[in-house]
Image (cartoon, rainbow, N blue to C red):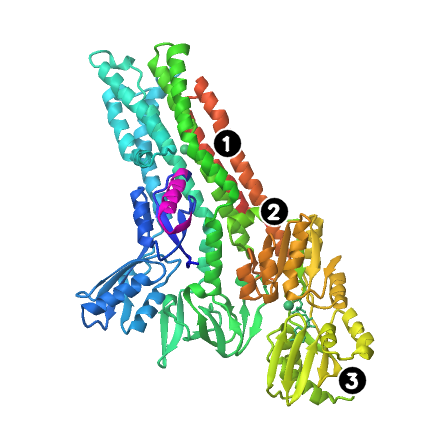
């Protein structure tokens, strides 16, 4: 199998959803490209490809040849350490090989490098590191820093300028038109505005300087044998404009005031459509606010100790292994481990937990959290795009940029829509010209223009992506990270929720509670053997046992042999003695008689404790029990799920009694206990066979297969990375309320998309016949079109105000 690679390109110049489809098709045609997914709203394209056959430069060329542009970040470096042109070559090759670098050129004479890259995939630090390994040094040139252009902001500025310019020119034209009518003839009008040549002078800049973007867009579309909204606008306004010129020429020598011209039709139309675009750009900017907020959480600089010196560095220059100083009240700049000091940390921005957490040497700190009171020295373990926050941002961006299946339909429809509309417009013209009002060219032309303009499918293209963006962005603010638009769509159909016990329903931090000895074993000896054996296990149960035993002041040794038996327990050899610690089944498997202790053990289990049997040298030696606390929010959250009509099931590898005791406390009726790790996925499948739409919620490595199997896997953000990888949704806050919130958010988003699609379809379906029948002046059609796009976007933005419980 070939190695697949994925890359994201930022694309500029798309005017509607049809452009997105075109780029998608173009990219897919390239040999080696397996999949391409272009998002119109986010202006991004995700490409999956085989790197041995295709490369990013090909994609750029393709996009360019279709008439769009790939936007990339640029950075300039000073290079030190080069001795000859071969060095330059080597560096250039290495840079170009980096994932995410689109083009790198090294100039030996100037000792500089210019790199175009995609900041989502590669950072300046990555480049420096790679080149450092070759024995050279890159230093970022000062002026290039912080030059990150927000092209969305630029777009807003551009459209705003255009709108003001074309408004100023259009107002006199509109004025002339209004005072043209019988009933408004009392309105004073400067004589010259009636002059056809003055009108032409006013209308021409609007038509070509402002409206030029529609001609360009239309040309690109037609050249690629497709049609989009630009084609409709260009056709409609050109018809009005050129027909007016024709009439003006005819009028030479006659009384100019008597001619009816249509310059205002095209100019006002263009002005209104530009206004619509301006609103659209503004609204799009607002819906990416969730990501901006997340970016805002990042610290900008860090105090780093290097070669005995305290340096204040920009955050991009911190590397793994650096010792970072974090003063009280400061943001932790990167993910790391405390190396010296203790403090309370406010982690609410990541976990949602408002009470500060006490941390000390050896504890993990997360970048962007706030150090409340102590001075900390932290050893950086993750920087740049690897930090927890950067990962969160990445997931949110991807979700916002991905497509929900429901959108495909809209894309296809808007793709075939335009040719049909042009057809309808021509028929309308012919019917008016030959049948309704024979010979009246102007009247028929006006109808044609109105149809062309009202039929514009721009609202249709915006309907889904704007909702997905707003919905997933809002969810992210509550710590619910959808990995893709399709999950946002599936989630609202769920009817069954399976909860893992440890770490999901409970806090997953058990503590040692009981030790029962048997067969005359002495406590100290027993605990030392057990603790030493469990030391090798990474299971939370083992951690609890080791911790508890250490607290009793018992020193642990090292074991000669260790083996974890997933779902059963462990087997170990300590001080020449063989040990088994774990479940009843583990004892049965090894023919160890535990009969007499069972009633006592069950007693512990009925209290919700997890009791483990211990055998030393094949002789039963005792029981060791731990208890986990239930999350405060679990019971209410489970009640909420039940009230929403969902079936709630608890699944665990723990024994029946313990599981049942916990389930009773939180109000879960269905319990699947003593399920082996590989069995969890099987249980999910069983429920799916019964026609259920199943969500699996878990945190552990042993939950990963089930998370992947379920219709929707939800990983608890405080759990393991493996679980998060396998899941479709990450719940950053451990609170189970997030499950209900995720389902609710999904329902609201889907409802919002349906409203948008309905409105967009209805607007075209109603507007086109009205225009064809002649009840709609062209300028009104323009207003309606702008209004429909803007209303779709505004409706989507309502999702951003939804309040969730979690
Ligand atoms: N390191 C260990 N030491 C002793 N017993 C263990 C150990 N690991 C597992 N066991 C035994 O095996 C059982 C099943 O473990 P498993 O990891 O499958 O589930 P769990 O962590 O108890 O529950 P959940 O599935 O809710 O996370 C445990 O309840 C325990 O009795
Ligand atoms: Cu439009
Ligand atoms: Mg577990």
Badge 1 marks a residue whose secondary structure is helix
Is 22 colored magenta in this rendering?
Answer: yes
Task: State the residue position of label 2.
Answer: 492
Mark 2 residue crowding within 10 angstroms, few (<14) / some (14–19) / many (20+): some
One can see residue 310 in this view: yes
Do the numbered discs 3 and 2 sit on residues whose CB atoms are within 8 Å? Answer: no
In front: 464, or 154? 464
Q: Which residue is mark 3?
A: 518
Dividing the picture into quadrants, the one containing residue 637 is: bottom right
Q: Which residues are magenta?
A: 18-36
Please, is residue 726 above or below residue 774 in the view? Answer: below
| Residue 805: x %, y % from top left | 62, 53
Q: Is residue 387 positioned above or below 669 on the image?
A: below
Q: Earlier in the sequence, mark 3 or mark 2?
A: 2
Q: Position of residue 438 (x, y in %)?
A: 37, 9
Quick one: 602 or 279, which is closer to the camera?
A: 602
Q: Position of residue 406 (x, y in %)?
A: 52, 41
Residue 761's disc number: 1
Q: Secondary structure at mark 3?
A: loop
Image quarter where the C terminus lies is: bottom right
Q: Does the beta carbon at disc 2 come under 8 Å from ligand 1?
A: no
Q: Is residue 484 left or right of residue 577?
A: left
Q: Main secondary structure of the magenta part?
A: helix
Is 471 a magenta residue?
A: no
Asked if the residue at tag 1 contacts the one at tag 3, i.e. Cβ–Cβ closer than 8 Å, the answer is no
As measured in the structure, the alpha-carbon distance from the residue carrying label 3 to the one carrying label 1 is 76 Å
Work out which quarter of the rendered image holds the N terminus and state it.
bottom left
Between 163 and 739, the residue placed more toward the observer is: 739
Numbered marks: total = 3
The residue at 49%/41% (across/down) is 407
Q: Is disc 3 surrounded by few (<14), some (14 to 19) or many (20+) residues within 10 Å? A: some
């Amino acid at each position: 199998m070939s190695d697949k690679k994925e890359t994201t390109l930022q694309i500029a110049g798309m005017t509607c959803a049809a452009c997105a489809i075109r780029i998608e098709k173009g990219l897919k045609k390239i040999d080696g490209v397996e999949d391409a997914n272009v998002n119109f709203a986010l202006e991004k394209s995700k490409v999956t490809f085989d790197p041995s056959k295709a490369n990013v430069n090909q994609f750029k060329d393709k996009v360019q040849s279709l008439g769009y542009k790939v936007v990339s970040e640029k950075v300039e470096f000073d290079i030190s350490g080069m001795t000859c042109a071969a060095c330059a070559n080597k560096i250039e090759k290495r840079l170009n090989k980096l994932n995410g670098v689109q083009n790198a050129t090294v100039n030996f004479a100037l000792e500089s490098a210019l790199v175009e890259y995609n900041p989502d995939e590669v950072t300046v630090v990555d480049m420096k590191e790679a080149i450092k390994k070759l024995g050279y040094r890159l230093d970022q040139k000062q002026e290039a820093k912080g030059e990150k252009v927000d092209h969305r902001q630029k777009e807003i500025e551009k459209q705003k300028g255009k709108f003001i310019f074309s408004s100023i020119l259009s107002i006199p034209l509109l004025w002339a038109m209004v005072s043209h009518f019988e009933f408004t003839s009392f309105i004073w009008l400067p004589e010259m505005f009636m002059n056809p040549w003055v009108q032409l002078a006013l209308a021409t800049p609007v038509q070509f300087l402002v409206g030029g973007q529609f001609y360009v867009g239309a040309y690109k579309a037609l050249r690629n044998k497709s049609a989009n909204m630009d084609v409709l606008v260009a056709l409609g306004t050109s018809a009005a404009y050129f027909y007016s010129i024709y009439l003006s020429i005819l009028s030479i020598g006659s009384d100019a005031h008597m001619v009816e011209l249509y310059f205002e039709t095209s100019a006002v139309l263009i002005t209104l459509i530009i206004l619509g675009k301006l609103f659209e750009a503004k609204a799009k900017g607002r819906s990416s606010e969730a990501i901006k907020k997340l970016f805002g959480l990042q610290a900008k600089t860090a105090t780093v100790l290097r070669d005995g010196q305290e340096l204040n560095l920009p955050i991009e220059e911190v590397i793994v292994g650096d010792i970072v100083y974090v003063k009280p009240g400061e943001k932790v700049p990167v993910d790391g481990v405390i190396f010296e000091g203790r403090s309370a940390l406010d982690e609410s921005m990541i976990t949602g937990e408002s009470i500060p957490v006490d941390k000390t040497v050896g504890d993990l700190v997360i970048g962007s959290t706030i150090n409340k009171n102590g001075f900390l020295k932290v050893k950086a373990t993750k920087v740049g795009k690897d930090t927890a926050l950067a990962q969160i941002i990445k997931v949110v961006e991807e979700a916002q940029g991905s497509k929900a299946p429901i959108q495909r339909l809209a894309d296809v429809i808007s793709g075939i829509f335009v040719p049909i509309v042009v057809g309808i417009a021509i028929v309308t013209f012919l019917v008016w010209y030959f049948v309704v009002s024979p010979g009246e060219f102007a009247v028929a032309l006006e109808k044609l223009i109105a149809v062309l303009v009202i039929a514009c499918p721009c609202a249709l293209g915006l309907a889904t992506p704007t909702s997905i963006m707003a919905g997933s962005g809002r969810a992210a603010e509550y710590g619910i990270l959808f990995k893709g638009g399709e999950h946002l769509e599936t989630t609202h159909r769920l009817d069954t929720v399976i909860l893992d016990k440890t770490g999901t329903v409970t806090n997953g931090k058990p503590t040692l509670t009981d030790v029962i000895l048997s067969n005359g074993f002495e406590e100290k000896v027993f605990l030392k053997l057990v603790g030493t054996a469990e030391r090798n296990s990474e299971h939370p149960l083992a951690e609890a046992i080791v911790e508890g035993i250490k607290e009793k002041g018992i020193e642990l040794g090292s074991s000669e042999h260790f083996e974890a038996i997933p779902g059963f327990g462990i087997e170990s050899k300590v001080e020449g003695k063989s040990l088994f610690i774990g479940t009843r089944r583990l004892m049965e498997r090894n023919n160890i008689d535990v009969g007499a202790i069972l009633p006592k053990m069950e007693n512990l289990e009925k209290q919700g404790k997890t009791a483990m049997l211990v055998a030393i040298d094949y002789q039963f030696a005792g029981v060791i029990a731990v208890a986990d606390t239930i999350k405060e929010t679990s019971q209410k959250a489970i009640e909420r799920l039940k009230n929403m009509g969902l079936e709630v099931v608890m699944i665990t590898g723990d024994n029946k009694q313990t599981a049942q005791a916990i389930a009773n406390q939180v109000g879960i009726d269905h319990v699947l206990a003593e399920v082996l790790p590989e069995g969890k996925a099987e249980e999910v499948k069983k429920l799916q066979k019964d026609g259920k739409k199943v969500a699996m919620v878990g945190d552990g490595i042993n939950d990963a297969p089930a998370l992947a199997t379920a219709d929707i896997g939800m990983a608890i953000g405080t759990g393991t990375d493996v679980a998060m990888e396998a899941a479709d949704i990450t719940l950053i806050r451990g609170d189970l309320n997030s499950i209900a919130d995720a389902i609710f958010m999904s329902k609201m988003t889907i409802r919002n998309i349906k409203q948008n699609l309905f409105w967009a379809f209805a607007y075209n379906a109603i507007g086109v016949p009205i225009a064809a029948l002649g009840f709609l002046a062209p300028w009104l059609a323009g207003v309606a079109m702008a209004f429909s796009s803007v209303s779709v976007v505004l409706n989507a933005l309502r999702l951003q105000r939804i309040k969730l419980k979690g």
